Amino acid sequence: MTRLLIVGPQGSGKGTQGTRIAEAFGILTVSTGDVFRGAVSAGTELGQQVKAIIEAGDLVPDELTSAVVRDRLSQQDAADGFLLDGYPRNVAQVMHLDEFLEGRDEQLDAVIELDVPRDVSISRISLRAAEQGRSDDTEEVIANRLAIYERETAPILDVYRTRGIVDRIDGVGSLDEITDRIIAALEARGLNRAAAA
């Protein structure tokens, strides 16, 4: 059973790498972005709240986010392990996650930090916005999100560094090169990939 967290600024490729790593280790990816987008497209009450917040370029409140993630991690398909992407995004959420995992006598095995220069993040997001026609990826919104990441999310890495579970990975290179770096770091911790099907 493997429990991972992937952290990096917007445009670092954490969504793509998270999916690849989850597949390699045979675990579920829990992306708050996907969970929120699902709620928005379903038009639920939560989805409507989330939509207004996201369109303003702001982040969904901690309590709401933590409740959504706790619910997701309590489902059967997360029982064999998971990779979290986009949560926790600040120190308060780290405490929420600690409390939830401790209640199940569990803890994170490793935190993958994708290290990408700011200018690379911005050019990747701009390209993605153009390719996918994503209205929430305007330059102003991107700058706001990166500033929030640097102010709120980067400090969670210090918390996890004191626990000795952060692997800092160079996030620049081909998709395969970056995936290989992550897998090598996780295997060095004694975490094993899922047996090939």
Image (cartoon, rainbow, N blue to C red):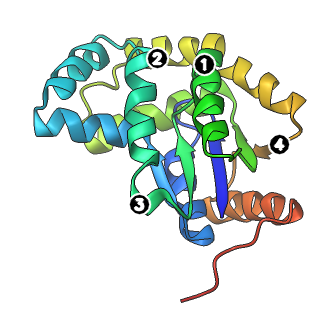
| Residue 167, quarter of picture | top right
- Is residue 30 rendered to the left or right of residue 120? left
Q: Secondary structure at mark 3?
A: helix
Q: Nearer the viewer, residue 163 or 14?
A: 163
Residue 98 locus on image (x, y percent): 66, 31
Name the residue that disc number 1 marks. Answer: 90
Q: Secondary structure at mark 2?
A: helix
Q: Secondary structure at mark 4?
A: loop
Residue 190 locus on image (x, y percent): 85, 65
Name the residue that disc number 3 marks. Answer: 76
Do the residues bearing badges 2 and 1 touch, measured as CB atoms within 8 Å? yes
- Is residue 108 rendered to the left or right of residue 63? right
Mark 3: amino acid: Gln
Query: Badge 4, how many Cα within 10 Å: few under 14, some, many 20+?
Result: some
Residue 77 locus on image (x, y percent): 42, 62
Which mark is first along the chain, 3 or 2?
Answer: 2
Query: Closer to the observer: label 3 or label 4?
Result: 3
Q: CA distance from mark 2 to mark 3?
A: 24 Å
Which mark is first along the chain, 4 or 3?
Answer: 3
Q: CA distance from mark 1 to mark 4?
A: 17 Å
Q: CA distance from mark 1 to mark 3?
A: 26 Å
Name the residue that disc number 2 marks. Answer: 62
Do the residues bearing badges 4 and 2 touch, measured as CB atoms within 8 Å? no
